[in-house]
Amino acid sequence: MTIQERFKLFLEHKDKNPTQLAKEINVNQKTLDNLSKGKAKPSSTVLIPLAELGLNINWLLIGEGKMLDKNTSPTKNKEDKFTNDIEYVKRENELLKSQLKDKERIIELKDAMIKLLSKES
């Protein structure tokens, strides 16, 4: 079975044509048309979004394994990204709190210095 044939099987599985899939994964429609017609081999700009949809790239390119990669599902990727985003926001929030405390302390010290200088004058 060729890459073209396996790609067509994936399209059937997704119940989409190349145009619909191109819109879904934000890839040029002509690129997927050429792939489905056997006029071109898939590049990384196509393979990465397909993998994110759960397509087993080894299966597509060389016919090894199953069509779908259970470890890469769109839902899992979105959940992982969401979790990573939450962790990032938490860390950023802690950093900002720390910076705010530092600035408040600097203001306190400057106020104390102003008082001391005012008394000396």
Image (tube, rainbow, N blue to C red):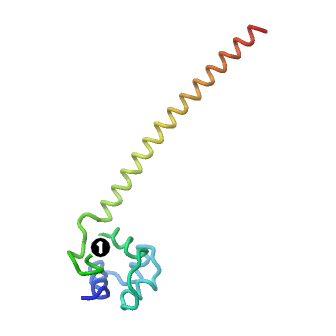
| Residue 108 falls left or right of residue 114 | left
Foreground of the two, 78 or 35: 35
Residue at 46% from the left image edge and 86% from the top image edge: 30
In the rendered image, which quarter contains the C terminus?
Answer: top right
The x, y position of residue 31, in whole percent, is 44, 84
The x, y position of residue 55, in whole percent, is 29, 73
In the rendered image, which quarter contains the N terminus?
Answer: bottom left
Residue at 46% from the left image edge and 36% from the top image edge: 94
Amino acid bearing label 1: Leu
Residue at 49% from the left image edge and 37% from the top image edge: 95
Q: Is residue 4 above or below residue 77?
A: below
Q: Is residue 27 above or below residue 109?
A: below
| Residue 88 falls left or right of residue 113 | left
Q: Is residue 49 above or below residue 103?
A: below
Quarter of the rendering containing residue 45:
bottom left
Query: Helix, strand, or loop for circle 1?
Result: loop
Task: Name the outermost residue toward the front.
Answer: 62
Task: Name the outermost residue toward the right.
Answer: 121
Residue at 47% from the left image edge and 80% from the top image edge: 28
Quarter of the rendering containing residue 43:
bottom left
Quarter of the rendering containing residue 76:
bottom left
Can you identify the residue that label 1 sits on?
55
Q: Residues within 10 Å of mark 1 (few under 14, many from 20)?
A: many
The x, y position of residue 114, in whole percent, is 71, 16
Q: Is residue 113 above or below residue 38?
A: above
- Total marks drawn? 1
The x, y position of residue 19, in whole percent, is 42, 83
Foreground of the two, 61 or 68: 61
